[in-house]
Amino acid sequence: MTNVAHTALSYCPDLFQYQRRATREVMVGNVGIGGDNPIRIQSMITSDTRDTEACVKEIIGLAEAGCEIVRVTAQTRKYAENLENIRDGVRAAGCDVPLVADIHFKPDAALEAAKWVEKIRVNPGNYADKKKFETREYSDEQYAEELERIREQFTPLVELCKELGRAMRIGTNHGSLSDRIMNRYGDTPLGMVESALEFARIARENDYHNFVFSMKASNPKVMVEAYRLLVARLHELGDDDGWNYPIHLGVTEAGDGEDGRIKSAIGIGSLLSDGVGDTIRVSLTEDAIYEIPVAKALVANIDKSACTHELWDANTLQRGPLSYDPFSYNRRKSHAIEINGFKLGGANTVRVFTSQEKWNAVAHKIEQMGDFKPEIVSEQSGAVEVNPLDRDAINKINANPKPTLVTIPDGMEMAVIHAYRLLACKLDAHHPILLKDTFTPSTNPDIDFQETLLTAARNLGTLLCDGIGDAILIQGEQAPGQSLRLAYNVLQAAGTRIFKTDYVACPSCGRTLFNLQETTQKIRAATGHLKGVRIAIMGCIVNGPGEMADADFGYVGGAPNKINLYINKTPVKFNIPEGEAVDQLINLIKENDRWIDPSRETVSV
């Protein structure tokens, strides 16, 4: 597997101060992406592309909700031909929202779609490529031959988009890298980046630059690393040479409910916090209309919390060497300590703290709360509060060879992510760190929970994905049970502490072969007690088999109302009638000794 030297790479001007990445502007119809434009909101309709009336109605509804760019799937040339009617219907209704054709596998569908819509999304992993999950070694000559074949297939689309003034998204998905990329780079963020760059070079050879990149994955850690590495590689290739292309952000197959929102806030929010990202889509396994307010709230959340730290001079912000690798996840190497019978730091799990007041509120049912219980009271923990800008205080702690739990005091004006990064760089590594979601504890019982959720997920999730943090404390949510649930759900979504079933569920689209929302809820109801089991629920085979590599079991649409079941990325049962498929999934889990009967003892938090 090919590696990359990370030490010389940089994906944002300053990891300790907010500054939006400067990019060229890419026009999608009448909507500009990048440059001086605001962060744009996107979504994708779920209607069958052959149903003109349903597509037009859904597109207009999304536009009225504030969606600025709408994507429509185009599986084949026949589907793509109907984009003309869809476009005409949308425009006749007085709606000028730009349309994007989502293309997988079929170059002829892309060429047809480019006649009618403002933007084409291509996936380098499957455009003119049939993924066979083959393991083979490519010589340099064979690899070059494959690239030449791709060039022959891709260049006509580039030329047509250039001629018609169409935009393009070169969108890599972790679940659908080509065999060529997989066998040279592995299923890695680097492989995702190189896959996109191959297509970008072909576009540039034809003097075509009206494109954006994306690096989507269902695992926020993988997604964050891939985007960081992409931006670093673009910067290395040269902003002056025109490699400053805009970035589209999204966590693919994020799921539904709180889990989908938290996972999206970790992946998208962490990058926006570092100034990366010019357009976003929050992919929820819900009606697409519900994605828009979440995306808007996420962008607004970043705007409110972005802090340039102009109050602090350069000397005050002096720090030691970066204490983590932004491009490769490794947990900060603190030393273990024990508090109230719980070990934290070192290789121990990240612990959940709560305030004394919240502890008292749930004390009567702690023994019945199972994996959702609070573990340590912050006021009794002995944690030392330190302003990361206070050199003397930091030096005093560093002079102590005994590991000490350290956190940041409330009331700090610094952004949470930047403050803890600065603390981690100045603090000797053996001291464990307690993370807070906010430096302003909530006193408002009526605060919007979505705002609280997005803030906590972005701040804590970003730091956990950086490898920083040995314990977490939710302060932005006043309700005791809800704050505990949020804490554990953030740990789960960040892949830091698995305490329940983990689901990879794609958003529905016109390719979906069964009712995703209904099926996801059925599977949740049947399997939600299986701690540590990861189940993927995929509407079709575009990303399904690839995402199976990250899941223990997969439920994938193979044909209309027919389901294929997977173990990891290997299909094991085919064409199961949809009405029988959930039971068959349960049987498959049992056959592989991963099933346990649900307990009736745990109470809700």
Image: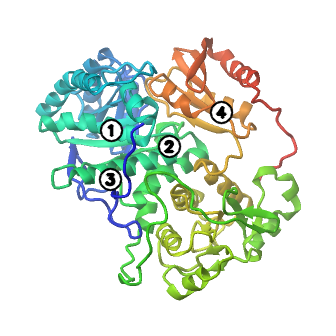
Q: Amino acid at mark 3?
A: Ala
Pointer 4 and pointer 1: residues touching (CB < 8 Å)? no
Q: Are marks 3 and 1 in contact (CB under 8 Å)?
A: no
Cα–Cα span, label 4 and label 2: 17 Å
Where residue 353 appears, x then y in whole percent? 71, 65
Q: Is residue 448 left or right of residue 245?
A: right
Marks 2 and 1, how far apart at CA: 33 Å
Dot 1 falls on a residue whose secondary structure is: helix
Quadrant containing the N terminus in the rendered view: top left
* Left or right for 284, reference 588: left
Q: What residue would you read off at disc 2?
A: 290
Secondary structure under tag 2 reads helix
Look at label 4 and name its amino acid: Gln
Q: Earlier in the sequence, mark 2 or mark 3?
A: 3
Check the image and report above or below for 129 versus 476. Answer: above
- Which callout, 4 or 2, points to the residue nearer the camera? 4
Residue at image mark 1 = 194
Residue under label 3? 232
Residue at the location (77% across, 51% down)? 371
Q: Where does label 4 land, which residue?
A: 521
Q: Measure how far apart labels 2 and 3 are at the Cα level.
A: 33 Å
Residue at left 40%, top 35%? Answer: 185
Amino acid, disc 2: Tyr
58 or 124: nearer the eye? 124
